[in-house]
Amino acid sequence: GASDVTQSPSILWVWQKESAEMNCSHSKGASYFHMYWFRQQQGKPMELIAFTTLNQEPDFGTFSKEKYSATKTVAQNGSFTVKKVQADDSGVYLCAVSEHSESHLMHCCTKT
Ligand SMILES: *[C@@H]1O[C@H](CO)[C@@H](O)[C@H](O)[C@H]1NC(C)=O
Ligand SMILES: *[C@@H]1O[C@H](CO)[C@@H](O)[C@H](O)[C@H]1NC(C)=O
C-alpha cells in the first residue's frame, strides 16, 4: 500500500551540522498508529533507526537519542529528524506504518 503512505520532502539537502526533518503521513486509518523509520545506505542493509507509537517515547534501539529524534502525536502522521547532519548521514530514509506491533506487518514504504 505504498500509495497510502507518503513522505515529504522527497529530496532533502541540508548543510552539515544542521538538522534534517522529514514527515510521513498515511491514509490507512486511526488503527495504524505505529510508525517506523528506516535508513538505506548504498551497499548496506536497511536499518531500523526508530520505532514510534502514539504519545510514547520513541524507541531508537541501538541508535542515539542525541543524533535522532522522532515525534508522533496523531495516528495519521509523524516526523523524524537527523540532528547535526554529517556526510555519512546521506541515504534513503523510509517510513513505514503498521497496525499491530506484534504482527510487524508494515505498509511500506515511501522515501526521503
Ligand atoms: C513537516 O511537518 C511540520 C509540522 O507540521 C511542518 O512545519 C513542516 O513544514 C513539514 N515539513 C515538510 C518538509 O513537509
Ligand atoms: C499531522 O496531522 C495533523 C492533524 O491532521 C495536522 O494538524 C498536522 O499538521 C500534521 N503534521 C504533519 C507533520 O503532517
Image: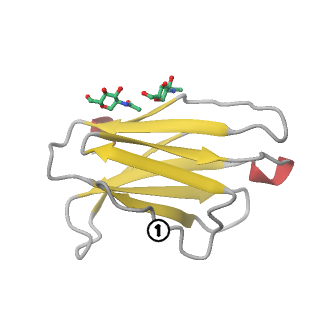
Q: Residue placed at 55% from the left, 30% from the top? A: 10
Residue 32 is situated, as x and y percent measured from the top left of the image, at 21, 52
Residue 102 is situated, as x and y percent measured from the top left of the image, at 23, 76
Q: Looking at the picture, which amino acid does disc 1 mark?
A: Asp
* 52 vs 112: above or below: below
Question: Quadrant of the image for the C terminus?
Answer: top right
Query: Left or right: where does residue 75 sit relative to residue 14?
Result: left
Q: Nearer the viewer, residue 54 or 101?
A: 54
The residue that label 1 is drawn on is: 59
* 110 vs 70: above or below: above
Query: Left or right: where does residue 106 sit relative to residue 12?
Result: left
Q: State the count of labels.
A: 1
Residue 48 is situated, as x and y percent measured from the top left of the image, at 52, 66
Rendering quadrant holding ligand 2: top left
Category of crowding for the residue at label 1, using alpha-carbon neighbours closer than 10 angstroms: few (below 14), some (14–19), many (at least 20): some
Q: Residue placed at 66% from the left, 38% from the top? A: 20
Residue 103 is situated, as x and y percent measured from the top left of the image, at 23, 73
Q: Residue placed at 85% from the left, 39% from the top? A: 16
